Image: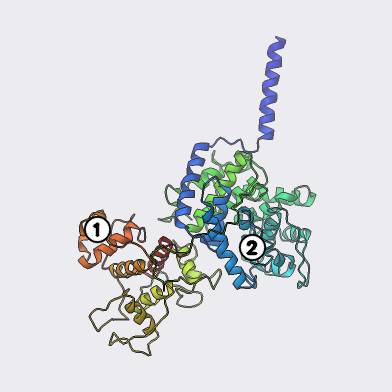
Amino acid sequence: MKKLVNRSLIYLLAVTMLLSTAPFAFAESSSDLDSAIKDTAEYIYETVSTPELGSVGGEWAVLGLARSNFEAPDEYYQNYYKAIEEYVSEHKGILHEKKYTEYSRLIITLTAIGKDPTDVGGYNLLTPLGDYDKTIFQGMNGPIWALIALDSRNYDMPENTTAEIQATRDMYVQRILDCQLADGGWSLFGGTDSETAEYAVSEPDITGMALQALAKYQDREDVKKACDEALACMSDIQNSNAGFSSWGSENIESCVQMAVALCELEISLDDERFVKNEKTMFDNIMSFYVEGSGFLHTKSQDSTNQMATEQGFYALIAISRAMNDKNSLYRMSDAVNVGNKDDIPAVGLPNKHKDVNTPKVTKIGKTFDDVQKHNNQLAIEALASREIINGKTETIFEPNATMTRAEFATIIVKALGLIPNTSNIFTDVKAEDWFAPFVGTASTYNIVSGKSQSFFDPNGVITREEAAAMVSRAAKLCGMDTEYETIEARDLLSQFTDYVKSSNWARVSLAFCYDNKILDSSVMEIQSKETIKRCEVAQMVFNMLSCAKLL
């Protein structure tokens, strides 16, 4: 009898120790998690083939890949770093005059790939974070991400000799604590001088980020108290799907930030406070997952979203790292090191025309109010940051508006970095027209043709098949193989229910665009004679430049 008692006690002790020491013992299928990570990593690696400076299609994509087990070639990170180094050098170390999260985000990602953020093109990117006033200018995002960046590899607080108030870590921690709302959480401007009624309600994404920033300061009694209050607040507002809503709708990003927060705090996702109807935040995140395409922003959307995909991906990485007892997402003493090789491949394909030279980023972080969460946001912002495509105004892009033939010719010429040169080929293109140099250049390089030998129709709207023809000609200049046999083109297009309605002259171009994923082959119809939208043009040009290794 004594033996049985002892064995029972040993069993109970073992179970107790397991539950108390394994913060990530939740019973989700690790195979589902691993499969989703692998699938999403491959999708991001393909869609963000040439990451650049920016929150979408840039740092978060690189961070996720670097912190996962995905085996991206060193050249992937090296090319990214080379582009960053060139940008920082050209802009004399100034990423933004007011948005200091640009520095924090870049510091985090450079740390993740083993690069030194204190010497990027001769500039110390940590230095701006030593300016307290400028760092907190953005509201809560400023001090939150400054702490996460500084603590990602325990960097010393930089001395900023131009700052009116020299920052310290304690000052940023205190700023976050001072801005905690009465209900226990945080919002972007709540608790600050910019607070209004709409900012006085806790937001799960901002609260999650604040908890991530405070995770390393749990030994402070005031921080621990604030975190416990925030967790209670978030538990109360978590919905029956174990997710969160912000700005009136349930979305993946809000759940992502809270899931990452629990991982940073070493709290299990099956902690009873955050399990609703037997569902965890992992379940909620996976409910937005679309195999082969990333993640949805909201479940009402028909297609995935790049920002949601990148955030969903790094949330899975955070969960996986926690389950496998690895350093958390933002604790990077185990960061990869891609080295400093000099054999970085040249930009572009071997057969690229000597005059083709895609513009560099000149407007970091350029975006528009009406493309936020848009399916084509990444492409629009990538082109806008290089001044390849403009908005209708500084803040409005009008993604669903049509595009004229002259506008399309202009975008293509800018995308290829060709020198504009007016010609007198078309009678309806006058030398004084703003688009004359671009139409002339596009014609000279055989990218565009007229409606007739002398008539271009610059103000006519462009159709999908016309856009495909122009893009394929541009792709040929970029060194891509655009030649297809008639039978081969027909076979490629036969999957579409309306391919017979396309013009004979356009079918090879359409086949090329679909075969190289410049056009989305998941749709059922080509709609070749329909006018193409501005957002679709941006996506086509972006995809073409990516395929040609020019971004």
Q: Nearer the viewer, residue 180 or 309?
A: 309
Q: Residue at x 78, y 73 (%)?
A: 164
Task: Kindly indicate the quadrant of the structure image that contains residue 484.
Answer: bottom left
Name above or below for residue 216 compared with residue 506: above
Q: Nearer the viewer, residue 470 or 222?
A: 470
Q: Residue pushed farthest top?
A: 1
Q: Position of residue 273 (x, y in %)?
A: 63, 42
Q: Position of residue 289 (x, y in %)?
A: 46, 48
Evaluate whether residue 379 shows in this view.
Answer: yes
Q: Is residue 173 left or right of residue 350?
A: right
Q: Nearer the viewer, residue 471 or 140?
A: 471
Q: Position of residue 80 (x, y in %)?
A: 54, 60
Image quadrant where one finds the N terminus: top right
Name above or below for residue 292 compared with residue 174: above
How many residues crowd mark 1 within 10 Å: few (<14), some (14–19), many (20+)?
some
Q: Position of residue 301 (x, y in %)?
A: 43, 56
- Please, which colouring scheme is shown? rainbow
Q: Are marks 1 and 2 in contact (CB under 8 Å)?
A: no
Evaluate whether residue 247 shows in this view.
Answer: no
Q: Which residue is mark 2?
A: 188
> How many numbered badges does the structure rendering display?
2
Residue type marked 2? Leu
Name above or below for residue 479 compared with residue 437: above
User: Disc 1 or disc 2, which is closer to the eye?
Assistant: 1
Residue type marked 1? Ala
Task: Kindly indicate the quadrant of the structure image that contains residue 10.
Answer: top right
Q: Which residue is mark 1?
A: 489
Residue 232, numbered label: none
Q: Residue pushed farthest front?
A: 343
How many residues crowd mark 2 within 10 Å: few (<14), some (14–19), many (20+)?
many
Q: SS at mark 2?
A: loop
Q: SS at mark 1?
A: helix
